Image (spheres, rainbow, N blue to C red):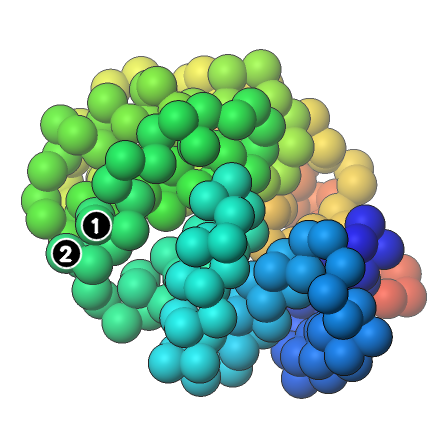
């Protein structure tokens, strides 16, 4: 299962969505009725959602969570469908009573809190979003890309809605500058640069841009994207 998960994420990061689906469908046949079978359904749900096949994705994801309510990836797959379709009420219902499950530590739990928070943007409940940011999304001392991009994205969205986020940008500067010089994730770099600019650290933002410029001469997908 670990190997399949790692392949799933690697294919996703390369945009190979059809290969994600093919891989999981083959694995489902081979897996038969062994333990954690529904994890594969959740992975298939995400690959289908990313290809715009929302009805199939939602049904599979909901079924997987019904079998194992602690399956965060399947919760995530359904959350993506509901966000893509703008179904705020369904999204709030989907996350209702999941606080205990989402209490798990780590970047992915924070990512699910981010999903929960952006649903509230559609309801206009700014105070709730800020409370969720401070309690669950704020990466604190984390330096991994997912934790940081969750926080950066949510603060940016709030500001795009004319919300005053106070001094929260300053707290992200250290984490956003942590990987300067290593640019294998252009998506993350764009977020880090934005956060540093909003925090007033224009010198560090410039270092990221310069590092990306140097990285583009390498081989590989990230260099091509840059």
Q: From this viewpoint, which residue is outermost toward the left?
A: 124
Q: Does residue 153 sit above or below 102 in this rendering?
A: below
Q: Would residue 224 appear left or right of 208 to someone viewing this image?
A: right
Q: Would residue 17 appear left or right of 110 to someone viewing this image?
A: right
At horizontal 27% and vertical 35% (from top left) the residue drawn is 97
Circle 1 residue: 93
Circle 2 residue: 89
> Can residue 132 be seen in this snapshot?
yes
- On the image, the x and y values in percent for residue 11 come to 74, 68
- 62 or 154: nearer the viewer: 62
- 28 or 32: nearer the viewer: 32
Dot 1 lies on which element?
Answer: helix
At horizontal 44% and vertical 32% (from top left) the residue drawn is 101
At horizontal 71% and vertical 45% (from top left) the residue drawn is 210
- On the image, the x and y values in percent for residue 107 come to 57, 33
Q: Could you tell me which quadrant the C terminus lies in? A: bottom right
- On the image, the x and y values in percent for residue 118 come to 28, 47
């Amino acid at each position: 299962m670990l190997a399949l998960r790692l392949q799933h994420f690697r294919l996703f990061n390369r945009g190979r969505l059809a290969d994600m689906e093919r891989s999981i469908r083959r694995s489902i046949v081979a897996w038969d009725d062994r333990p954690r079978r529904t994890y594969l359904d959740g992975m298939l749900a995400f690959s289908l959602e990313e290809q715009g096949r929302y009805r199939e994705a939602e049904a599979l994801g909901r079924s997987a969570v019904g079998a194992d309510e602690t399956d965060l990836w399947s919760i995530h797959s359904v959350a993506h469908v509901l966000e893509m379709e703008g179904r705020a009420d369904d999204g709030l219902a989907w996350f209702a009573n999941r606080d205990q499950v989402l209490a798990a530590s780590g970047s992915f739990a924070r990512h699910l809190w981010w999903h929960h928070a952006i649903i509230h943007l559609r309801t206009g409940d700014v105070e709730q979003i800020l409370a969720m940011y401070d309690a669950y999304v704020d990466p604190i001392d984390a330096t991994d890309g997912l934790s940081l991009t969750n926080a950066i994205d949510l603060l940016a969205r709030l500001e795009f809605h004319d919300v005053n986020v106070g001094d929260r940008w300053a707290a992200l500067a250290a984490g956003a500058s942590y990987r300067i010089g290593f640019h294998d994730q252009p998506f993350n770099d764009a977020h880090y640069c934005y956060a540093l600019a909003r925090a007033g650290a224009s010198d560090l933002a410039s270092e990221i841009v310069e590092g990306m410029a140097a990285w583009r001469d390498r081989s590989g997908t990230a260099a091509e994207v840059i």
